[in-house]
Amino acid sequence: MEPRNLQTVLAQQPLLRDLEPRHLALLTGCARNVRFDRGAYLAREGQGAETFYLIRSGRVAVELHQPGSPPLTIQTVGPGEFFGWSWLVPPHRWRFDGRAVAPAGALQFAAPCLRAKCEEDHELGYQVLRRLIQMVAGRLEGARLQLLDLYALETRR
């Protein structure tokens, strides 16, 4: 995909729609289109987190590895949502697995590229962090609700 077309795609994403054109251009320089077959991993817990994703189509399960048991799905991410924040927090290692539960298309961002651009342009850094913290807050709320459901289930037994 041509960079100009990629910038247009980025501008159409709800989480990025209000970014200034210069910031969209900086993001575009770190992005590329990728596809994942059902069952493919976008990330594996413990590996280096050198990318993150904006899901365009399909679904991605955020999973927690459990030795001797199937993985525990913490949340499912869909179109218009980010997958991955580990790229931002040293030591830049994935804290969860990310697995496509349906064929998925995404914008993949190169983390070293984006970290450098955010260091150079602090306004871009603020805009990226503002959007990522919304995602993290949503994930924490989702985890809280799951724990409440689990607690309620346990007390009924």
Image: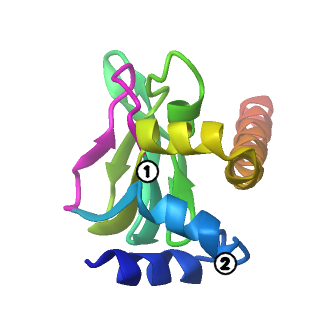
Would you call the spot at circle 2 few (<14 residues within 10 Å), some (14-19), or many (20 or more)?
some
* Amino acid, disc 1: Ala
Are the residues at dot 1 and dot 2 in contact (C-beta closer than 8 Å)?
A: no
Q: Quadrant of the C terminus?
A: top right
Residue where numbered disc 1 is placed:
61
For the residue carrying disc 1, how many other residues have a C-alpha within 10 Å: few (<14), some (14-19), or many (20+)? many
In the image shown, does 119 or 100 lie closer to the viewer? Answer: 119
Main SS of residues in magenta: loop
Q: Is 23 or 33 nearer to us in this picture?
A: 23
Q: Position of residue 84 (x, y in %)?
A: 51, 43
In this image, 151 relative to 102: left or right?
right
Residue 113: image location, x then y, percent: 43, 42
Residue 50 included in the magenta stretch of the image? yes
Question: For the N terminus, which image quadrant?
Answer: bottom left
Q: In the picture provided, is 95 more to the left or to the right than 32?
A: right
Q: Amino acid at mark 2?
A: Arg
Mark 2: secondary structure: loop
- Secondary element at image label 1: strand
Residue 5, above or below 102: below
Residue 80 drawn at (x, y percent): 56, 71
Q: Position of residue 7 (x, y in %)?
A: 46, 76
Q: Is residue 98 left or right of residue 155?
A: left
Circle number at residue 17 = 2
Highlighted magenta segment, given as a residue range: 36-51
Q: Is residue 4 above or below residue 142?
A: below
